[in-house]
Image (tube, rainbow, N blue to C red):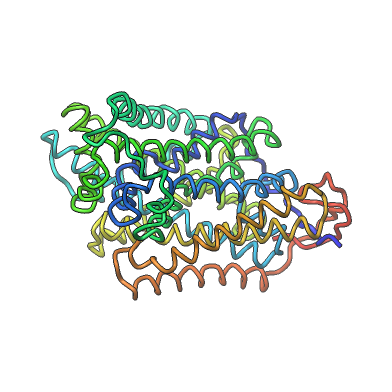
Amino acid sequence: MAAPAESTAPASRLTGTLGVGSIVFMVIAAAAPLTVIAGTIPLGVGAGNGAAFPMTFVLCAVVLLLFAVGFCAMSPHVPDAGAFFTYIRHGLGRPFGLGAAFLALATYTAVQAAVYGYIGAAIDELVASLGGPSVPWWVWTLAVVAIVGVLGYRHIELSSRVLGVLLLAEIAIVLVLDVVVFASGGGPEGLSTALFDPVQVASGEVGIAIMFAIASFIGFEATAVFRDEARDPQRTIPRATYLALVIVGVFYAISTWAIVSAWGDEAAVAESGANPATFLLTTFENWLGPAGGLIVTILLVTSLFAAILAFHNVAARYWYALGGHGAFPSAVGRTHARHGSPHVASLTQTILAAALVIVFAVAGLDPVAQVFAWMAGTATLGILLLMVLTCIAVLAFFARSRVDRRVWHTRIAPALGLVGLLVCLALTIRNFPTLIGGSTGLALGIGAVLVVVFLAGVVVAVTRKPAEPALSGDPAAPGGVPGDTPRENV
Protein backbone atom coordinates (compact mmCIF):
# COMPACT_ATOMS: atom_id res chain seq x y z
CA MET A 1 0.00 0.00 0.00
CA ALA A 2 1.35 3.40 -0.91
CA ALA A 3 2.36 5.71 1.87
CA PRO A 4 0.35 8.88 2.21
CA ALA A 5 1.78 11.88 0.49
CA GLU A 6 2.11 15.35 1.86
CA SER A 7 1.07 18.72 0.61
CA THR A 8 3.96 20.24 -1.20
CA ALA A 9 2.64 23.57 -2.36
CA PRO A 10 4.94 26.36 -1.33
CA ALA A 11 3.81 29.84 -0.45
CA SER A 12 4.84 31.02 -3.89
CA ARG A 13 6.61 29.52 -6.85
CA LEU A 14 10.06 30.21 -8.18
CA THR A 15 10.17 31.15 -11.83
CA GLY A 16 12.70 30.69 -14.60
CA THR A 17 13.40 29.15 -17.97
CA LEU A 18 16.68 27.37 -17.22
CA GLY A 19 17.63 24.82 -19.81
CA VAL A 20 19.89 21.78 -19.48
CA GLY A 21 23.00 23.85 -20.21
CA SER A 22 22.28 26.50 -17.58
CA ILE A 23 21.64 23.95 -14.83
CA VAL A 24 24.71 21.93 -15.83
CA PHE A 25 26.79 25.11 -15.62
CA MET A 26 25.63 25.75 -12.06
CA VAL A 27 26.19 22.16 -10.97
CA ILE A 28 29.67 21.96 -12.47
CA ALA A 29 30.48 25.39 -11.06
CA ALA A 30 29.60 24.05 -7.61
CA ALA A 31 32.04 21.22 -8.22
CA ALA A 32 34.67 23.95 -8.77
CA PRO A 33 36.75 22.06 -11.38
CA LEU A 34 39.89 24.17 -11.12
CA THR A 35 39.75 24.13 -7.33
CA VAL A 36 39.53 20.33 -7.41
CA ILE A 37 42.43 20.17 -9.87
CA ALA A 38 44.50 22.42 -7.59
CA GLY A 39 43.51 20.98 -4.22
CA THR A 40 42.21 17.44 -4.54
CA ILE A 41 44.48 15.98 -7.20
CA PRO A 42 47.75 16.60 -5.27
CA LEU A 43 46.22 14.94 -2.20
CA GLY A 44 44.76 12.02 -4.13
CA VAL A 45 48.02 11.37 -5.98
CA GLY A 46 50.36 12.08 -3.08
CA ALA A 47 48.43 10.45 -0.23
CA GLY A 48 46.04 8.12 -2.08
CA ASN A 49 46.68 5.54 -4.78
CA GLY A 50 49.42 7.47 -6.58
CA ALA A 51 49.55 7.70 -10.34
CA ALA A 52 46.42 5.53 -10.66
CA PHE A 53 44.28 8.23 -9.00
CA PRO A 54 42.61 9.29 -12.31
CA MET A 55 40.69 5.99 -12.40
CA THR A 56 39.29 6.70 -8.93
CA PHE A 57 37.25 9.55 -10.41
CA VAL A 58 35.78 7.13 -12.95
CA LEU A 59 34.84 4.60 -10.25
CA CYS A 60 33.18 7.28 -8.12
CA ALA A 61 31.32 8.65 -11.16
CA VAL A 62 29.94 5.15 -11.86
CA VAL A 63 28.65 4.86 -8.28
CA LEU A 64 27.00 8.28 -8.51
CA LEU A 65 25.48 7.47 -11.91
CA LEU A 66 23.86 4.39 -10.36
CA PHE A 67 22.54 6.64 -7.62
CA ALA A 68 21.30 9.10 -10.25
CA VAL A 69 19.20 6.45 -12.02
CA GLY A 70 16.83 6.10 -9.06
CA PHE A 71 17.16 9.80 -8.22
CA CYS A 72 15.97 10.79 -11.71
CA ALA A 73 13.29 8.08 -11.86
CA MET A 74 11.72 9.47 -8.69
CA SER A 75 12.01 13.09 -9.82
CA PRO A 76 8.62 13.27 -11.64
CA HIS A 77 6.87 12.05 -8.49
CA VAL A 78 8.29 14.75 -6.19
CA PRO A 79 7.67 17.89 -8.26
CA ASP A 80 8.95 20.52 -5.86
CA ALA A 81 12.27 22.10 -4.94
CA GLY A 82 14.35 20.64 -2.12
CA ALA A 83 16.14 17.65 -3.69
CA PHE A 84 17.44 15.41 -0.89
CA PHE A 85 14.89 16.84 1.54
CA THR A 86 11.84 16.12 -0.64
CA TYR A 87 13.04 12.73 -1.83
CA ILE A 88 13.69 11.48 1.69
CA ARG A 89 10.42 12.98 2.94
CA HIS A 90 8.41 11.19 0.27
CA GLY A 91 10.27 7.91 0.71
CA LEU A 92 10.87 7.68 4.45
CA GLY A 93 8.34 10.07 5.97
CA ARG A 94 8.17 13.54 7.44
CA PRO A 95 10.55 13.14 10.43
CA PHE A 96 13.37 11.72 8.30
CA GLY A 97 12.65 14.29 5.61
CA LEU A 98 12.90 17.25 7.92
CA GLY A 99 15.98 15.78 9.58
CA ALA A 100 17.55 15.48 6.13
CA ALA A 101 16.55 19.06 5.32
CA PHE A 102 18.32 20.40 8.39
CA LEU A 103 21.34 18.23 7.59
CA ALA A 104 21.40 19.38 3.96
CA LEU A 105 21.20 23.03 4.93
CA ALA A 106 24.05 22.57 7.41
CA THR A 107 26.07 20.66 4.81
CA TYR A 108 25.79 23.27 2.07
CA THR A 109 26.42 26.06 4.54
CA ALA A 110 29.57 24.21 5.63
CA VAL A 111 30.90 23.76 2.10
CA GLN A 112 30.15 27.39 1.30
CA ALA A 113 31.98 28.46 4.47
CA ALA A 114 34.92 26.27 3.45
CA VAL A 115 35.25 28.00 0.10
CA TYR A 116 34.77 31.42 1.70
CA GLY A 117 37.85 30.75 3.80
CA TYR A 118 39.86 29.58 0.80
CA ILE A 119 38.90 32.49 -1.45
CA GLY A 120 39.91 35.11 1.14
CA ALA A 121 43.39 33.66 1.34
CA ALA A 122 43.61 33.20 -2.45
CA ILE A 123 42.60 36.79 -3.23
CA ASP A 124 45.06 38.16 -0.69
CA GLU A 125 47.88 36.07 -2.16
CA LEU A 126 46.99 37.13 -5.71
CA VAL A 127 46.77 40.84 -4.85
CA ALA A 128 50.03 40.73 -2.91
CA SER A 129 51.80 38.94 -5.79
CA LEU A 130 50.71 41.74 -8.13
CA GLY A 131 52.13 44.40 -5.80
CA GLY A 132 48.92 45.26 -3.99
CA PRO A 133 48.33 45.57 -0.24
CA SER A 134 48.13 42.54 2.03
CA VAL A 135 45.03 42.65 4.23
CA PRO A 136 43.37 40.09 6.53
CA TRP A 137 41.69 37.28 4.58
CA TRP A 138 38.28 37.99 6.06
CA VAL A 139 38.19 41.49 4.53
CA TRP A 140 38.27 40.01 1.04
CA THR A 141 35.83 37.28 2.06
CA LEU A 142 33.22 39.69 3.40
CA ALA A 143 33.43 41.64 0.12
CA VAL A 144 32.72 38.38 -1.73
CA VAL A 145 29.81 37.66 0.65
CA ALA A 146 28.27 41.00 -0.35
CA ILE A 147 28.66 40.36 -4.09
CA VAL A 148 27.22 36.87 -3.81
CA GLY A 149 24.34 38.26 -1.75
CA VAL A 150 23.44 40.73 -4.51
CA LEU A 151 23.56 38.06 -7.23
CA GLY A 152 21.59 35.59 -5.12
CA TYR A 153 18.89 38.20 -4.48
CA ARG A 154 18.27 38.73 -8.17
CA HIS A 155 16.83 36.37 -10.79
CA ILE A 156 18.52 33.00 -11.17
CA GLU A 157 19.29 33.72 -14.85
CA LEU A 158 21.84 36.35 -13.77
CA SER A 159 23.69 33.86 -11.56
CA SER A 160 23.55 31.34 -14.38
CA ARG A 161 25.22 33.74 -16.83
CA VAL A 162 27.94 34.70 -14.36
CA LEU A 163 28.64 31.05 -13.56
CA GLY A 164 28.70 30.14 -17.23
CA VAL A 165 31.40 32.70 -18.07
CA LEU A 166 33.57 31.82 -15.06
CA LEU A 167 33.18 28.09 -15.64
CA LEU A 168 34.18 28.24 -19.29
CA ALA A 169 37.31 30.20 -18.38
CA GLU A 170 38.53 27.77 -15.73
CA ILE A 171 37.79 24.70 -17.83
CA ALA A 172 39.48 26.26 -20.86
CA ILE A 173 42.83 26.80 -19.12
CA VAL A 174 42.90 23.20 -17.85
CA LEU A 175 41.98 21.87 -21.28
CA VAL A 176 44.84 23.88 -22.79
CA LEU A 177 47.25 22.09 -20.46
CA ASP A 178 45.63 18.73 -21.27
CA VAL A 179 45.99 19.30 -25.02
CA VAL A 180 49.63 20.42 -24.74
CA VAL A 181 50.60 17.43 -22.58
CA PHE A 182 48.82 14.85 -24.74
CA ALA A 183 50.04 16.44 -27.99
CA SER A 184 53.59 16.19 -26.62
CA GLY A 185 53.12 12.54 -25.74
CA GLY A 186 53.44 13.26 -22.04
CA GLY A 187 56.50 14.07 -19.99
CA PRO A 188 59.80 12.21 -19.66
CA GLU A 189 58.05 8.83 -19.28
CA GLY A 190 55.37 9.37 -21.90
CA LEU A 191 51.67 8.99 -21.09
CA SER A 192 51.01 7.25 -17.79
CA THR A 193 49.45 3.77 -17.90
CA ALA A 194 48.98 3.39 -14.13
CA LEU A 195 45.25 4.18 -14.28
CA PHE A 196 44.68 1.14 -16.51
CA ASP A 197 46.38 -1.25 -14.08
CA PRO A 198 43.87 -2.69 -11.52
CA VAL A 199 46.73 -3.56 -9.17
CA GLN A 200 47.91 0.05 -9.05
CA VAL A 201 44.35 1.39 -8.77
CA ALA A 202 43.89 -0.72 -5.62
CA SER A 203 47.34 0.10 -4.26
CA GLY A 204 48.41 2.60 -1.60
CA GLU A 205 45.72 4.29 0.47
CA VAL A 206 42.81 3.64 -1.88
CA GLY A 207 40.36 4.64 0.84
CA ILE A 208 41.84 8.12 1.02
CA ALA A 209 41.78 8.33 -2.78
CA ILE A 210 38.06 7.44 -2.91
CA MET A 211 37.30 9.89 -0.10
CA PHE A 212 38.93 12.80 -1.94
CA ALA A 213 37.42 11.80 -5.28
CA ILE A 214 33.85 11.51 -4.00
CA ALA A 215 34.20 14.89 -2.30
CA SER A 216 34.97 16.41 -5.72
CA PHE A 217 31.41 15.71 -6.94
CA ILE A 218 29.65 17.64 -4.16
CA GLY A 219 26.76 19.65 -5.58
CA PHE A 220 25.64 17.49 -8.50
CA GLU A 221 22.24 16.82 -6.89
CA ALA A 222 21.51 20.54 -7.20
CA THR A 223 19.90 19.78 -10.56
CA ALA A 224 16.69 18.86 -8.71
CA VAL A 225 16.89 21.95 -6.50
CA PHE A 226 16.33 24.13 -9.57
CA ARG A 227 13.34 22.20 -10.93
CA ASP A 228 10.89 25.10 -10.35
CA GLU A 229 13.13 27.34 -12.44
CA ALA A 230 13.71 24.81 -15.22
CA ARG A 231 12.14 25.22 -18.64
CA ASP A 232 10.88 21.60 -18.76
CA PRO A 233 11.64 19.89 -15.43
CA GLN A 234 10.53 16.41 -16.50
CA ARG A 235 13.23 16.31 -19.16
CA THR A 236 15.68 18.98 -18.05
CA ILE A 237 16.43 17.58 -14.57
CA PRO A 238 17.38 13.99 -15.59
CA ARG A 239 19.38 15.17 -18.60
CA ALA A 240 21.23 17.79 -16.55
CA THR A 241 21.98 15.28 -13.76
CA TYR A 242 23.46 12.64 -16.07
CA LEU A 243 25.30 15.18 -18.20
CA ALA A 244 26.83 16.93 -15.19
CA LEU A 245 28.11 13.67 -13.71
CA VAL A 246 29.59 12.48 -17.00
CA ILE A 247 31.25 15.82 -17.80
CA VAL A 248 32.72 16.20 -14.31
CA GLY A 249 33.91 12.60 -14.10
CA VAL A 250 35.53 12.61 -17.54
CA PHE A 251 37.07 16.06 -17.04
CA TYR A 252 38.64 15.11 -13.70
CA ALA A 253 39.91 11.76 -14.94
CA ILE A 254 41.48 13.10 -18.16
CA SER A 255 42.96 16.19 -16.52
CA THR A 256 44.49 14.16 -13.69
CA TRP A 257 45.89 11.72 -16.23
CA ALA A 258 47.46 14.64 -18.13
CA ILE A 259 49.00 16.15 -14.99
CA VAL A 260 50.44 12.82 -13.85
CA SER A 261 51.80 12.22 -17.35
CA ALA A 262 53.37 15.68 -17.39
CA TRP A 263 55.59 14.69 -14.45
CA GLY A 264 55.92 10.92 -14.82
CA ASP A 265 54.45 8.48 -12.29
CA GLU A 266 57.13 8.55 -9.60
CA ALA A 267 57.88 12.26 -9.96
CA ALA A 268 54.17 13.15 -9.78
CA VAL A 269 53.72 11.21 -6.54
CA ALA A 270 56.87 12.71 -5.04
CA GLU A 271 56.11 16.31 -6.03
CA SER A 272 52.43 16.23 -5.03
CA GLY A 273 53.35 14.68 -1.68
CA ALA A 274 56.12 17.18 -0.95
CA ASN A 275 54.49 20.36 -2.32
CA PRO A 276 50.72 19.86 -2.64
CA ALA A 277 49.94 23.59 -2.40
CA THR A 278 52.09 24.53 -5.42
CA PHE A 279 51.81 21.30 -7.42
CA LEU A 280 49.32 22.65 -9.97
CA LEU A 281 50.99 26.06 -10.31
CA THR A 282 54.37 24.44 -10.92
CA THR A 283 52.84 22.12 -13.52
CA PHE A 284 51.34 25.03 -15.44
CA GLU A 285 54.53 27.09 -15.26
CA ASN A 286 56.59 24.12 -16.49
CA TRP A 287 54.34 23.54 -19.50
CA LEU A 288 52.74 26.92 -20.27
CA GLY A 289 55.34 29.32 -18.86
CA PRO A 290 54.98 32.13 -16.28
CA ALA A 291 51.96 33.54 -18.11
CA GLY A 292 50.16 30.22 -17.70
CA GLY A 293 50.98 30.24 -14.00
CA LEU A 294 49.55 33.75 -13.57
CA ILE A 295 46.39 32.92 -15.52
CA VAL A 296 45.70 29.80 -13.48
CA THR A 297 46.24 31.74 -10.25
CA ILE A 298 43.63 34.31 -11.32
CA LEU A 299 41.19 31.66 -12.53
CA LEU A 300 41.56 29.77 -9.26
CA VAL A 301 39.99 32.78 -7.55
CA THR A 302 37.15 32.94 -10.08
CA SER A 303 36.65 29.18 -9.70
CA LEU A 304 36.23 29.62 -5.96
CA PHE A 305 33.79 32.49 -6.53
CA ALA A 306 31.73 30.39 -8.94
CA ALA A 307 31.56 27.57 -6.39
CA ILE A 308 30.45 29.95 -3.64
CA LEU A 309 27.70 31.44 -5.82
CA ALA A 310 26.47 27.99 -6.85
CA PHE A 311 26.38 26.70 -3.27
CA HIS A 312 24.67 29.91 -2.14
CA ASN A 313 21.88 29.33 -4.66
CA VAL A 314 21.46 25.72 -3.50
CA ALA A 315 21.38 26.64 0.19
CA ALA A 316 18.91 29.48 -0.46
CA ARG A 317 16.56 27.04 -2.15
CA TYR A 318 16.69 24.73 0.85
CA TRP A 319 15.68 27.68 3.03
CA TYR A 320 12.95 28.46 0.50
CA ALA A 321 11.64 24.88 0.44
CA LEU A 322 11.53 24.69 4.24
CA GLY A 323 9.83 28.06 4.47
CA GLY A 324 7.27 27.03 1.88
CA HIS A 325 6.49 23.84 3.81
CA GLY A 326 6.10 25.64 7.12
CA ALA A 327 9.26 24.41 8.85
CA PHE A 328 10.63 27.97 8.90
CA PRO A 329 8.72 31.31 8.90
CA SER A 330 6.54 31.60 5.80
CA ALA A 331 8.41 34.69 4.59
CA VAL A 332 11.44 32.50 3.81
CA GLY A 333 9.29 30.57 1.33
CA ARG A 334 8.24 33.60 -0.69
CA THR A 335 9.63 34.92 -3.96
CA HIS A 336 10.51 38.42 -5.12
CA ALA A 337 7.72 40.07 -7.12
CA ARG A 338 10.07 41.27 -9.89
CA HIS A 339 13.06 38.91 -9.81
CA GLY A 340 11.13 35.71 -9.11
CA SER A 341 13.95 34.74 -6.73
CA PRO A 342 13.82 33.36 -3.17
CA HIS A 343 15.04 36.75 -1.97
CA VAL A 344 14.32 36.32 1.74
CA ALA A 345 15.93 32.89 1.75
CA SER A 346 18.93 34.30 -0.10
CA LEU A 347 19.30 37.17 2.37
CA THR A 348 19.07 34.70 5.25
CA GLN A 349 21.89 32.60 3.79
CA THR A 350 23.98 35.73 3.18
CA ILE A 351 23.58 36.86 6.80
CA LEU A 352 24.45 33.36 8.05
CA ALA A 353 27.57 33.22 5.86
CA ALA A 354 28.74 36.65 7.03
CA ALA A 355 28.19 35.66 10.65
CA LEU A 356 30.27 32.49 10.22
CA VAL A 357 33.11 34.43 8.58
CA ILE A 358 33.13 36.90 11.47
CA VAL A 359 33.19 34.05 14.01
CA PHE A 360 36.10 32.38 12.20
CA ALA A 361 37.98 35.68 12.04
CA VAL A 362 37.45 36.47 15.74
CA ALA A 363 38.55 32.95 16.65
CA GLY A 364 41.77 33.48 14.68
CA LEU A 365 41.32 30.37 12.52
CA ASP A 366 43.59 29.82 9.53
CA PRO A 367 41.41 30.25 6.41
CA VAL A 368 42.84 27.21 4.60
CA ALA A 369 44.32 24.80 7.14
CA GLN A 370 41.37 25.13 9.52
CA VAL A 371 38.31 26.84 7.98
CA PHE A 372 38.59 25.15 4.58
CA ALA A 373 39.76 21.76 5.84
CA TRP A 374 37.24 21.47 8.68
CA MET A 375 34.23 22.74 6.76
CA ALA A 376 35.00 20.77 3.57
CA GLY A 377 35.38 17.61 5.64
CA THR A 378 32.05 18.29 7.33
CA ALA A 379 30.35 18.78 3.96
CA THR A 380 31.80 15.56 2.51
CA LEU A 381 30.49 13.45 5.38
CA GLY A 382 27.13 15.22 5.33
CA ILE A 383 26.60 14.75 1.58
CA LEU A 384 27.40 11.03 1.77
CA LEU A 385 24.93 10.57 4.61
CA LEU A 386 22.26 12.39 2.60
CA MET A 387 22.90 10.32 -0.53
CA VAL A 388 22.69 7.07 1.45
CA LEU A 389 19.36 8.17 2.94
CA THR A 390 18.14 9.23 -0.51
CA CYS A 391 18.99 5.82 -2.00
CA ILE A 392 17.03 4.11 0.77
CA ALA A 393 14.15 6.56 0.24
CA VAL A 394 14.06 5.82 -3.52
CA LEU A 395 13.92 2.07 -2.91
CA ALA A 396 11.22 2.47 -0.26
CA PHE A 397 9.14 4.86 -2.37
CA PHE A 398 8.96 2.64 -5.44
CA ALA A 399 8.47 -0.55 -3.44
CA ARG A 400 5.50 1.07 -1.71
CA SER A 401 3.91 3.12 -4.48
CA ARG A 402 4.63 1.00 -7.57
CA VAL A 403 4.14 4.06 -9.77
CA ASP A 404 7.14 2.94 -11.84
CA ARG A 405 7.65 -0.76 -12.53
CA ARG A 406 11.00 -0.53 -14.34
CA VAL A 407 13.19 -2.94 -12.36
CA TRP A 408 16.52 -1.38 -13.32
CA HIS A 409 15.47 2.18 -12.52
CA THR A 410 13.61 1.49 -9.28
CA ARG A 411 15.43 -1.47 -7.72
CA ILE A 412 18.68 -2.70 -9.24
CA ALA A 413 20.47 0.61 -9.96
CA PRO A 414 19.44 2.27 -6.67
CA ALA A 415 20.48 -0.86 -4.72
CA LEU A 416 23.88 -0.97 -6.44
CA GLY A 417 24.28 2.75 -5.85
CA LEU A 418 23.44 2.26 -2.17
CA VAL A 419 26.11 -0.44 -1.81
CA GLY A 420 28.70 1.78 -3.48
CA LEU A 421 27.78 4.79 -1.36
CA LEU A 422 27.92 2.73 1.85
CA VAL A 423 31.45 1.67 0.92
CA CYS A 424 32.39 5.31 0.27
CA LEU A 425 30.78 6.37 3.56
CA ALA A 426 32.64 3.69 5.51
CA LEU A 427 35.95 4.70 3.94
CA THR A 428 35.24 8.37 4.61
CA ILE A 429 34.45 7.74 8.27
CA ARG A 430 37.60 5.63 8.60
CA ASN A 431 39.78 8.32 7.04
CA PHE A 432 37.82 11.34 8.25
CA PRO A 433 40.54 12.56 10.65
CA THR A 434 42.93 12.74 7.69
CA LEU A 435 40.44 14.80 5.69
CA ILE A 436 40.15 17.44 8.41
CA GLY A 437 43.78 17.64 9.44
CA GLY A 438 44.46 14.57 11.57
CA SER A 439 42.47 15.27 14.77
CA THR A 440 40.38 12.33 15.97
CA GLY A 441 38.71 14.48 18.62
CA LEU A 442 37.69 17.08 16.04
CA ALA A 443 36.40 14.31 13.75
CA LEU A 444 34.20 12.93 16.54
CA GLY A 445 32.98 16.44 17.34
CA ILE A 446 32.00 17.16 13.73
CA GLY A 447 30.25 13.81 13.45
CA ALA A 448 28.32 14.54 16.63
CA VAL A 449 27.26 17.96 15.32
CA LEU A 450 25.87 16.41 12.12
CA VAL A 451 23.92 13.83 14.12
CA VAL A 452 22.52 16.53 16.42
CA VAL A 453 21.48 18.68 13.44
CA PHE A 454 19.67 15.73 11.86
CA LEU A 455 17.94 14.83 15.13
CA ALA A 456 16.91 18.46 15.61
CA GLY A 457 15.00 18.26 12.32
CA VAL A 458 13.37 14.99 13.41
CA VAL A 459 12.32 16.53 16.73
CA VAL A 460 10.83 19.59 15.00
CA ALA A 461 8.86 17.31 12.67
CA VAL A 462 7.52 15.24 15.56
CA THR A 463 6.72 18.05 17.98
CA ARG A 464 5.52 20.91 15.79
CA LYS A 465 1.84 21.50 15.23
CA PRO A 466 0.77 19.70 12.03
CA ALA A 467 -0.14 21.90 9.10
CA GLU A 468 -3.42 21.63 7.26
CA PRO A 469 -3.62 18.14 5.68
CA ALA A 470 -3.77 17.88 1.93
CA LEU A 471 -5.99 15.56 -0.05
CA SER A 472 -3.50 14.10 -2.48
CA GLY A 473 -5.16 10.96 -3.79
CA ASP A 474 -4.93 12.44 -7.26
CA PRO A 475 -1.60 11.30 -8.71
CA ALA A 476 -1.40 14.59 -10.53
CA ALA A 477 -1.33 16.48 -7.24
CA PRO A 478 2.10 17.61 -6.04
CA GLY A 479 3.71 14.61 -4.43
CA GLY A 480 0.60 12.49 -4.85
CA VAL A 481 0.64 8.85 -5.88
CA PRO A 482 -2.27 6.49 -6.49
CA GLY A 483 -3.83 5.27 -3.28
CA ASP A 484 -2.49 8.12 -1.13
CA THR A 485 -4.47 9.32 1.85
CA PRO A 486 -4.42 12.69 3.57
CA ARG A 487 -1.34 13.55 5.56
CA GLU A 488 -0.13 16.65 7.33
CA ASN A 489 2.33 18.99 5.70
CA VAL A 490 5.94 19.29 6.71
**Residue pictured at 45% horizontal, 73% vertical:** 448
Residue at image point 77% right, 62% down: 488
State whether residue 78 is above or below residue 287: below
> What residue sits 14% from the left and 44% below the top?
134
Is 397 displayed left or right of 273 in the figure? Answer: right
Task: Pinpoint residue 205: horizontal percent, then vertical percent.
Answer: 35, 60
The image shows residue 223 at horizontal and vertical percentages of 58, 41
Name the residue furthest left.
131
Horizontally, is 247 left or right of 296 in the view?
right
Q: What residue appears at the point 44 percent right and 67 percent down from the top-left corner?
A: 429
Q: Position of residue 96 (x, y in %)?
A: 65, 66
Q: Nearer the viewer, residue 215 or 120?
A: 215
In the displayed structure, 372 sits above or below 258; it is: below
Q: Position of residue 394 (x, y in %)?
A: 69, 56
Quarter placement of the N terminus: bottom right
Q: Which of 13 and 217 is in front in this view?
A: 217
Q: In this view, does 443 lie to the left or right of 426?
A: left
Count of labels in the image: 0
Q: In the rendered view of the protein, which quadrant contains the C terminus? A: bottom right
Nearest the eye: 243 or 157: 243
Residue 171 found in image quarter: top left
Q: Is residue 447 shown left or right of residue 221?
A: left
